[in-house]
Image (tube, rainbow, N blue to C red):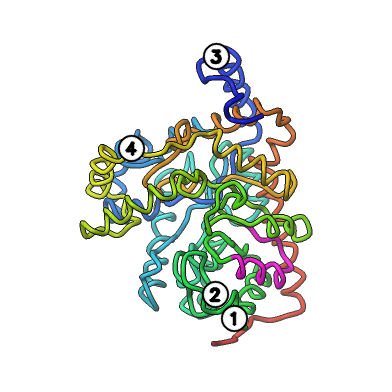
């Protein structure tokens, strides 16, 4: 069923589906692959959590707070401990440690709602307790500064995936949005993937070039993930996953988690976002800036350049395609909330997941399939990666390879 065939949101059938979606999420909550709340807290209030108390409504400032996570049916969140890729060397490592620290502060401040999770079993236990399992993912291999010892240290601190690159190439891997240099992974890049397999850290292939995706899949013996990427066949953007890569996930056991970022999912939004980003840079802002001053510039730009609007149906189109190519056992959700200036209509913030589930119900997705999408696929991928790590660590010690 296409977006045009679905019911308007105000119909009785649509309201019934939304109620059904909320009931389903109460049993099979969302594991979201990527949320940039830690970076937003860094940029907006320099980690002063009293100024952004997420126990209260923060919709004026953030996509994320506890009441909206609860309303959205979120049961597990990979908090991104991202730092921008123009952070280099030890500065990138230090900033990543600060990001990890603020996640720890959030867990200490809100123990009734958030609980630290390191394993798939921890995720299941949190669901039983009615708390939101909180895991971490490092977004970009620049965070380890070419050091496998630093990679292991991040794992010891609780990081359970690493995105191999962010928007720029690094010494050992090509990014999707930079000029190709390595042609995928270098020899050291392959060793990073092997060491991630050995310790049980998920290899995240969002942001990387298609050549890097293919190299990583050829090397990894554990499931990979795409923490926030959609289908390139539906929207031709280098941040999305080509069909040949999606088709490899059943053999690998991996999971591609569809993102909500309009410029990655709606073709009409790609050119508009490029112009809006140029407008930010022309006024002295980084193009990824989402601070109030940057957003004010965006709003002024929108007045004369109307923004194309993605919807929950746009995301569902991607999930339909990803399901067709990769299979129902290999897809998930990674919204990228608080890491994007714009979100789709109906998915404005973390309270929106029921609207996506309702859209999929309207397209004939079964409860069993939706339970895989929202919860069990991501949990299974982490559990399988843990099993691989147990086997590998029994036969191989830490790698001390260097570039």
The percent coordinates of residue 150 (x first, y second) are: 50, 76
Circle 4 is placed at which residue position? Answer: 306
Label 2 neighbourhood size at 10 Å, few (<14), some (14-19), many (20+)? many
Question: Can residue 164 be seen in the rendering of this structure?
Answer: yes
SS at mark 1 in the image: loop
Query: Which residue corresponds to mark 2?
Result: 173
Q: Quadrant of the N terminus?
A: top right
Is residue 224 depicted above or below 260 in this figure?
Answer: below
Q: CA distance from mark 2 to mark 4?
A: 37 Å
> Mark 1 — residue?
186
Q: Earlier in the sequence, mark 2 or mark 1?
A: 2
CA neighbours of label 4 inside 10 A, class few (<14), some (14 to 19), many (20+): few
Q: Going from the N terminus, do you reach mark 4 or mark 1 first?
A: 1
Distance between the Cα atoms at labels 4 and 1? 43 Å
Q: How many discs mark residues in the rendered view? A: 4
Whole-angstrom CA distance, mark 2 to mark 3, is 49 Å
Residue closest to the eye, 19 or 305:
305
Q: Is 167 on the left-hand or right-hand side of 281?
A: right
> Which x, y percent locates residue 293?
22, 48
* Residue at (69% x, 67% y) in the render: 217
* Mark found first going from the N terminus, 3 or 1: 3
Q: CA distance from mark 3 to mark 4?
A: 28 Å
Image x and y of residue 394, in percent: 76, 75
Which numbered disc, 3 or 4, marks the residue that appears first in the sequence? 3
- Magenta residue span: 210-225
Q: Is residue 199 left or right of residue 143?
A: right
Residue 11: mark: 3
Graded by Cα atoms within 10 Å as few (under 14), some (14 to 19) or many (20 or more), the crowding at tag 3 reads few
């Amino acid at each position: 069923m296409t977006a045009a065939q679905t019911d308007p949101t105000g119909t009785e059938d649509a309201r019934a589906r939304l109620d059904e979606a909320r009931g389903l999420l109460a049993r099979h909550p969302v594991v979201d692959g990527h949320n940039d709340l830690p970076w937003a807290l860094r940029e907006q209030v320099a980690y002063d959590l009293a100024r952004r108390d997420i126990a209260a409504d923060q919709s004026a400032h953030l996509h994320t707070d506890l009441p909206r996570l609860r309303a959205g049916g979120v049961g597990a969140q990979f908090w991104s401990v991202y730092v921008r890729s123009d952070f280099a060397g030890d500065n990138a490592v230090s900033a990543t440690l600060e990001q990890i620290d603020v996640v720890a502060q959030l867990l200490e401040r809100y123990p009734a709602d958030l609980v630290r999770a390191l394993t798939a079993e921890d995720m299941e236990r949190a669901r039983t307790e009615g708390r939101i399992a909180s895991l971490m993912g490092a977004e970009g291999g620049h965070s380890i500064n070419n050091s496998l010892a630093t990679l292991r240290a991040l794992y010891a601190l609780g990081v359970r995936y690493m995105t191999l690159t962010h928007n720029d190439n690094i010494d050992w891997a090509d990014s999707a949005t930079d000029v190709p240099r390595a042609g995928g992974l270098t020899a050291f890049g392959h060793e990073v993937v092997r060491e991630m397999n050995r310790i049980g850290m998920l290899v995240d292939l969002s942001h990387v070039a298609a050549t890097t995706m293919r190299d990583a899949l050829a090397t990894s013996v554990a499931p990979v993930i795409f923490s926030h990427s959609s289908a390139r066949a539906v929207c031709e953007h280098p941040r999305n996953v080509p069909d040949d890569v999606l088709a490899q996930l059943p053999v690998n056991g991996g999971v591609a988690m569809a993102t909500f970022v309009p410029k990655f999912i709606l073709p009409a939004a790609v050119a508009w976002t490029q112009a809006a980003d140029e407008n930010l840079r022309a006024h002295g802002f980084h193009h990824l800036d989402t601070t109030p001053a940057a957003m004010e510039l965006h709003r002024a730009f929108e007045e004369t350049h109307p923004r194309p609007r993605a919807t929950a149906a746009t995301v569902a189109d991607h999930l339909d395609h990803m399901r067709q190519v990769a299979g129902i056992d290999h897809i998930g959700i990674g919204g990228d909330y608080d890491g994007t200036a714009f979100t789709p209509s109906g998915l404005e913030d973390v309270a929106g997941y029921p609207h996506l589930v309702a859209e999929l119900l309207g397209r004939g997705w079964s409860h069993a399939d939706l339970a895989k999408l929202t919860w069990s696929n991501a949990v299974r991928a982490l559990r399988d990666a843990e099993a691989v790590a147990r086997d590998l660590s029994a036969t191989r010690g830490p790698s001390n390879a260097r570039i």
